[in-house]
Amino acid sequence: MTPKPLPGFRDFYPEQFAERAYIFETWRRIVRRYAFQEYDGPPLEPLDLYTQKSGEEIVTQLYNFVDKGDRPVAMRPEMTPTFARMVGARAQALRKPVRWFTIPQLFRYERTQKGRLREHYQLNVDIVGEADVMADAELLAVAIDIMRGFGLTADDVRARVSDRRLLNGLLTHHAIDEAAWAEVYAVLDKLARQPRDVSSEKLAAAGLNMSQVSLVLDMGAMTFDQVRAAYAEAPAAAAHVARFAEYVAHAEALGVASWISFDLTIVRGLAYYTGIVFELFDARGEFRAICGGGRYDNLLGALGGTDMPALGFGMGDVVLGEFIRERGLMPAFTTGLDFWVMSADLTPDATTRVLSLTHELRDAGRSVEYAFRPMSFKKQLEAAEKAGASQVIVIKAVETPSDELLVRVMTLAPRGERTMTVSEFLQDLQSNG
RNA sequence: GUGGCCGUAGCUCAAUUGGUUAGAGCACCGGAUUGUGGUUCCGGGGGUUGCGGGUUCAAUCCCCGUCGGUCACCCCA
């Protein structure tokens, strides 16, 4: 039995690597349009970077061990603590707002399932130092623009958006005790996946009265227009309603309004989100969330750095790859090769001529392959074909009166050929860039 | 951590309700006598039927365990 990779880990053969490279390139291409700068940190971190805020139970989902210097360490399961440290260390010096992105490989020890492995790459885009909702709109716009970069449309992907502060305002307005908010969040998060009476029981157990329970149960269906109509004048919620309206207006001006759905059931598991949160889903609901993020204004301070407003999102390569593959949007990658060089005869001199011309072509920036041992003409053409060469160069043994070698330039698809001298050929190459 | 389904060649699948030496297509490699094209033809390499035990005269097939895959739950920092 040939060895396999560890469970949940992937080998990237050239075909898969090409797909991964395509995803990374698209991420970078779009994110740079929004003027974000790329950074990275260590893939291995001190264990307590992750246990300090999250507690010891998180260790069960970490790849952690003690290194040879007796240091408890862990493979990074997320980028945020590293990011917080890096920003915190230069908090005063960095130009604000900080606009950074990274594509780390992250690790988590848990059972694999659809869209979830033990290792994945995750685009992280963050903004630090800006409290205005314009930054929230900008962040959402990048995420959505990335979808467009992959050829997806507003019919393929929905951006479901909520706002913790707005939600809290509504709960306050309805006199729902703050001690019950965590349970309300949990119920909202599961609203679509959990029977209504179960949700209802949980809310009642948390101390909500009947009208409060039905209010929460109905929140999942509320549009922003309904919220605005009902709470624009409510003291506890008015400011939050106004701010969210501003956010929507900015998003519209940035061209992404048609992708957005207001959805109070978007909670995000993270306890640290403080404001607008969003997730990107495929419109048919067949996949996990493609992307998730939001505002976490208190986190940098809580992690021991300078307290600054911050927001960001993560987008993994696994679900995204599954999704664009399923939609037929993953390009077919060919093993491109500019030239296959061969000789019409098989003498030792011919071999030297093949290598010399190959060298010249490579100096000119072309990708070139040739046979490592004597092969029949037909065999080489087949080999050139399989290698994906666009042209085959056959060096002819017959020399011209001017002592110049002739080459036959054969184009494979569509089939065609021309014969010329080597210098003509190289000249031609230059003029064609 | 809990549960369902599934493991035969690199890939997709066969193999008579347990029966001889586990086959085919694709892919890969070589050949069709010094060669000018993708077709075609011939040949070859490749399997401890995931692994270990059990039942049986006999196991790819039935049973148990284990490992792996997959899907859901939990969780999603």
Image: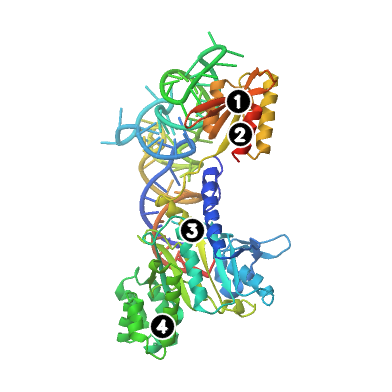
- Image height of A181 relative to A263, above or below: below
Query: Which corner quadrant holds the N terminus of chain A?
Result: top right
User: Of callouts 4 and 3, which one flags the residue occurring earlier in the amino acid sequence?
Assistant: 3
Residue A368, by quadrant, is top right
| Most foreground residue, A205 or A224 | A224
Q: Position of residue A28 (x, y in %)?
A: 56, 58
What separation in Å lies between label 4 and label 3 (alpha carbons)?
41 Å
Q: Kindly indicate whether the residue at mark 3 contacts the one at mark 4 (C-beta within 8 angstroms).
A: no
- Image height of A392 relative to A36, above or below: above
Query: Which corner quadrant holds the C terminus of chain A?
Result: top right
What separation in Å lies between label 2 and label 3 (alpha carbons)?
57 Å
Three-letter residue code for mark 4: Val
The lab-note entry on whether marks 1 and 3 share a chain reads yes
Three-letter residue code for mark 3: Arg
Residue highlighted by disc 4: A241
The numbered dot on residue A396 is none
Three-letter residue code for mark 1: Met
Q: Mark 1 lies on which chain?
A: A
Q: Kindly indicate whether the residue at mark 1 contacts the one at mark 2 (C-beta within 8 angstroms).
A: yes
Query: Would you say A4 lies left or right of A231 here?
Result: right
- Label 2 crowd bin: few (<14), some (14–19), many (20+), radius 10 Å: few
Residue highlighted by disc 2: A428
Residue shown at the point (30%, 74%) measured from the top left: A196
Q: Kindly indicate whether the residue at mark 3 contacts the one at mark 2 (C-beta within 8 angstroms).
A: no
Q: Mark 4 lies on which chain?
A: A
The numbered dot on residue A420 is 1
